[in-house]
Amino acid sequence: MVEKIISKFFDIRDSHTIEVYEQHGGYQTIQKVLKKMKPQDVVDEVTKSNLRGLGGAGFPAGRKWSFIPKDNPKPKYLVVNADESEPGTFKDRYVMDHYTHGLLEGMMIAGYAIGANLAFIYIRGEYVRQAERLLEQIEAARNSGYLGKGIFGSKFDFDIVVHRGAGAYICGEETALLESLEGKKGWPRMKPPFPAVEGAFGCPTIVNNVETIAYVPTIMERGGEWFAGIGSEQNGGMRLFGVSGHVEKPGLYELPLGTPLREIIYEHAGGIRNGKKLKAVVPGGSSSPILTQDEIDVKMDYESLAAIGSMLGSAGVIVMDDDTDIVRALHVVMRFYHHESCGQCTPCREGTGWAENIIQRILNDEGETSDLDNLVRIAENIMGNTICPLGDAAALPLRSYVTKFRGDFEARVSKGRKEAA
Amino acid sequence: MAEITIDGLRLEVERGTTVIQAADQLGIEIPRYCYHPGLSIVGQCRICLVEIERMPKLQVACHTPATDGMVVHTNSDKVLEARRAVLEFLLVNHPLDCPVCDQAGECWLQNYYMQHGQHDSQVVVDKVKKHKAQPIGPNVMLDSERCILCTRCVRFCDEVTATHELGIFNRGDHSELAPYPGVELANNYSGNTVDICPVGALTDRDFRFKTRVWYLNETPSICPGCSTGCNIVIHHNDERTYKADGARVARLKPRYNAEVNQWWMCDTGRYGFDFVDAESRLLRPRKRLGSELEILSWRKAMQAVAMAISETVRKYGPDSVAVVLSPQMANEDLFLGRELFSNLIGLANLAFEVPKLEPEEGDALLMTADRNPNSKGGWLLGLPHHHEVSLATLLQVAREKEVRGLYICHHDLGQAVADKELEAAFSQLDFLIFQGSNSNMVSEKADYVLPSTTFAERDGTFTSHAGRVQRFCQAVAPLGDSKPDWLIFKSLAKALGHAMPYFEAEDVFAALADEEAAFAGLDYGSIGESGAQLSPGAETKTPAKTKERESFF
């Protein structure tokens, strides 16, 4: 059993305070980094660790950091994406609740690496307690000289601003997040330019997920190679798998990347609730294509899931037993994306509502077989044709639920027809 | 430079050129809704998706820069399918109320559906309901259900006028265009939002339901509203004027000219065409005898006016008749007016501009304070710049009977001088002649009224304040017996015994270009549809011959 990194703090009383964090070795790494390392060394170490972006896209963190232009005289910013809104995902909340200073220390190291003297935490509006905790602990860090001018007696200035969102899913998309941070409507930007070149307030900006940054202190403490050695190929270290749904023990499980899905469900999460049989699993938050019970021998890393047409995403594992009405499950998903589509570009704005309406019609027993083809067609016409990934996030589950569980949908449609007759 | 291949055609383009711009240069039409060359790029509508070799996904042509060696396909199966899909999405919540929509016939949902869609509707669900027919400003009506959220109008108000009236509110398929709370779309360029709206969301309150657009014909012209000379198109209804209470000119639309107005025009100019079909139009030459009005034929009118002028000049000398030409008149009119009154009759007093009681204001965009289309043209022909004294002097010499006959073209002197003062001066005159298109306080007092055509009913040229000579063309027939000003001058010259060899405005311009250095080498062909910029050096004036004599002005 591999030693836990973040989740070991979940069981420690008052682990969110500076005192307790420091009793467990906190804030040693940042001091070592500030004294002994150049920013580029930090980037190299993180690159070596194979740390991936744990918000969902899985982009290698070290490589992202290296995109910050060296010759740009503008200020650089670090933005931590704490807008955790993907259904089935609840890891960042725990990180902020229990590993508060681990996140802050990770931000200091990341800020030092990319040359940012100011960082923002963009936190979803519903995370009231977490925002309050962050504000309180950032103030404590500032009072201790850990934030502000010349942190830890070094020449590096660093401070953190907490910005609360207003509850839009789209603001978890990094460029919409930046728009919202700037006080504008949360509409994703066209790329390029990418945020590393032109991000917050027109300045080079790195946007990283909470969990990604939270692993940085340990990587810098134990070394990139050590971290890379834990996960699977190109997938460094561990991550917090959030298991929800019809399992005996739902919760967060910090496990090496590459842990088989079957092991997560049956060993760590205690198997299917009430001795029922597994029907389907959503492996990485609601956007990831659904898997059938036959597909759970997959390794939970980015490449392995991509190979079977799904994705690791936010590692929010949603387990459905065989009592689950898959049509209703898809309706819940599509109602969410319909509600959360920002409306900026056509396919997502119109397609999500259309799809939800069709599924509603099927649930009303008014469906036609042609509706199923239309659902797949709508998904395929959204996919890849939108400004931001929300389109794909809606289209992928739509297509996968209907194609993988076509039988369930057809049964529902023909039931409707029989009753009408 | 980058060499790009689009649908097999190669083109060298400058760095930074986008695929849609390169395609436009090649004459390959890529459909677009949100893209507009005068606005920032947002990539929102997704109808311009194209296939680019070595890129896995389709790319929006509006936001993708052309790079060297790039190979683009705008008509592959994948592109056509995506385009059809975007259209289908756009129509999911569209009310499809074309039969009662004023945009029908010039709607890009209709056009692209015919070109690229033509699918049967699969949409059986209820559509999202939004606000209908809301007036959002004095000139613009919004139908939110028809809006495809391309944000062109929002960007126009943010980027061109910087007045920021409009925004997109709410989210997803409930997104709605609207003015900000408590704000009206009342900037003086609001009509442009209707032009750039690709669908029936924004319609023109002045134009709505007057006629179907397919009944309209189009004629290139120049806005006569100020000295900028915005290039426009007159949309005129030639056969179904009963649909608009007899109005033939239905609307003015801006016409692209990179050097002048780009894609835009101001509302003052856009909605300032009412006078063309107004009841106040002067339709027949006429003579006043006390309170009686007598309609004259042109022949009789010209004889009478010629007689009045020549008798007065014979009795009291060439200083006794004064003529006020107008910067509303075309170069051709001013040239022949100068020829007739200065050179042939030898009048000393030829005025041109009359300042208004309250000067107009211009803006930083297109509209100038000089609300005349051709002041510059007059100056280049040596007509005097105005100074406030001129009109006062004129009235004074009239009162004192030094001037006994006054010939006023177009000016509504009621806008420049108090009525009482005018009447005091007019009452002393032997004759007052008014030549113009619409009645005003001068025409009401005039002994002779000579009806001229409006800019929409004739050919001619204006010279903009920037020294650009631009042609306007006849869109509709002259109303009643009205004639172009130059033709009236030609007739009057004939009645005075001088034949002028001009049959078309173009002939007059040719003579003008021969005589006037500033216009040397120009003709209607070389001016073309986009105008000809006079070189700054060529703008030296030929002094009018009147200057050799003593003038009141």
Image (spheres, helix red, strand yellow):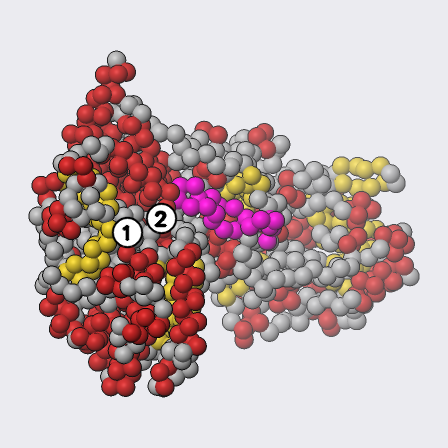
Element at badge 2?
A: loop
Q: Residues within 10 Å of mark 2 (few under 14, many from 20)?
A: many
Q: Which residue is mark 2?
A: A345
Image position, residue A319 (x, y; %): 20, 43
Q: x and y percent of residue B166 in the render?
A: 52, 51
- For the record, the magenta segment spans B166-187
Identity of the residue furthest to the front in this view: A13
Spatial distance from mark 1 to mark 2, Cα to Cα? 26 Å
Quadrant of the frame with the C terminus of chain B: bottom right
Q: Nearer the viewer, mark 1 or mark 2?
A: 1
Mark 1 and mark 2 on one chain: yes
Query: Does residue B367 belong to the magenta stretch?
Result: no
Q: Chain under label 2?
A: A
* Residue B345 figure quarter: bottom right
In the rendering, which numbered label is found on residue A89? 1
Q: Earlier along the polypeptide chain: callout 1 or callout 2?
A: 1
Which three-letter amino acid code belongs to the residue tagged 2? Cys
Q: Relative to residue B478, is residue B217 drawn left or right? A: left
The spot of residue B55 in percent (x, y) is 19, 57
Q: Is residue B46 visible?
A: yes
Type of amino acid at the residue the image marks with label 1 = Thr
- Residue at left offset 71%, top offset 58%: B325
In the picture provided, is B496 more to the left or to the right than A56?
right
- The disc label shown at residue B370, or none: none
Asked if residue A149 is positioned above or below residue B268 in the image, the reply reads below
**Dividing the image into 4 quarters, which one contains the N terminus of chain B?**
bottom left
